[in-house]
Amino acid sequence: MLESTGFSGEFPPPGGPMLWIKWLHIVFMVTWFAGLFYLPRLFVYHADTSDRPGHERFVIMERRLFAMMSVGAVGTVVFGAWLLFGWFWPAPPWLQAKLALVLLLVLYHFGCYRFMRDFRAGSNRKSARFYRYYNELPGLFLLGIVLLVVVKPF
């Protein structure tokens, strides 16, 4: 019965550890991006909030979401580095470009932390409109990263 599914019953399945590490890299990347897409959207709503209970609710939501997306970021980087040094070193040009985008994404992540800290302290000076534009950046990073990984244009 297992043969009809293409799985022979071996553990780990054929393909070696690289496929498992790649799987973990992708799972953590999805977790990270979920937070990167949603946290700036919370900033949009938080910037428009004027009541104290609403402000406190957003502070809690932002802190919890940032913690979850930070776990995703760390896992993405750890398993990505494992893939890089275990199987893709020296890095081909497409991967070097991807790594540059990931570095910018890490800086974006730290920018989110800074904005979250400003909201928590009550010192946010940015408008909801600013955060609407800021919220679009992770989508552009995702398009570029996936394009480089799938198409490998150079």
Image: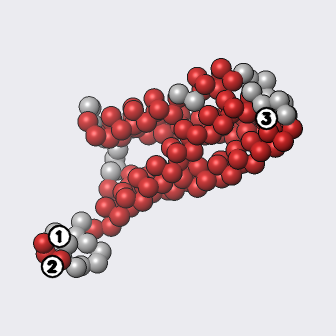
Left or right relative to 12: residue 39: right
Of residues 28 and 56, the one drawn nearer to the viewer in this rendering = 56
On the image, which quarter does residue 35 sit in?
top right
Residue farthest along the left direction in this orientation: 4
Q: Does residue 126 appear in the picture of this structure?
A: yes
Q: Quadrant of the N terminus?
A: bottom left
Q: Which residue is mark 3?
A: 118
Left or right relative to 112: residue 47: right
Residue 8 drawn above or below residue 145: below
Q: Which residue is mark 2?
A: 1
Residue 108 drawn above or below residue 129: below
> Image point 69% across, 24% down: which residue?
128
Of residues 94 and 8, the one drawn nearer to the viewer in this rendering = 8
Spatial CA distance of label 2 from label 1 is 7 Å
Q: How is the image coloured?
A: secondary structure
Q: Does residue 120 appear in the picture of this structure?
A: no
- Badge 2 vs badge 3, beta-carbon distance below 8 Å: no
> Image point 65% across, 21% down: which residue?
130
Q: Which residue is mark 1?
A: 5
Q: Secondary structure at mark 1?
A: helix
Circle 3 or circle 1, nearest the eye: 1
- Badge 2 vs badge 1, beta-carbon distance below 8 Å: yes
Spatial CA distance of label 2 from label 3 is 58 Å
Residue 134 percent across, percent down from the top left: 60, 26
Residue 17 percent across, percent down from the top left: 33, 67
N-term-proximal mark, 2 vs 3: 2
> Image point 74% across, 27% down: which residue?
48
Q: Secondary structure at mark 2?
A: loop
Q: Residues within 10 Å of mark 1 (few under 14, many from 20)?
A: few
Spatial CA distance of label 3 from label 1 is 53 Å
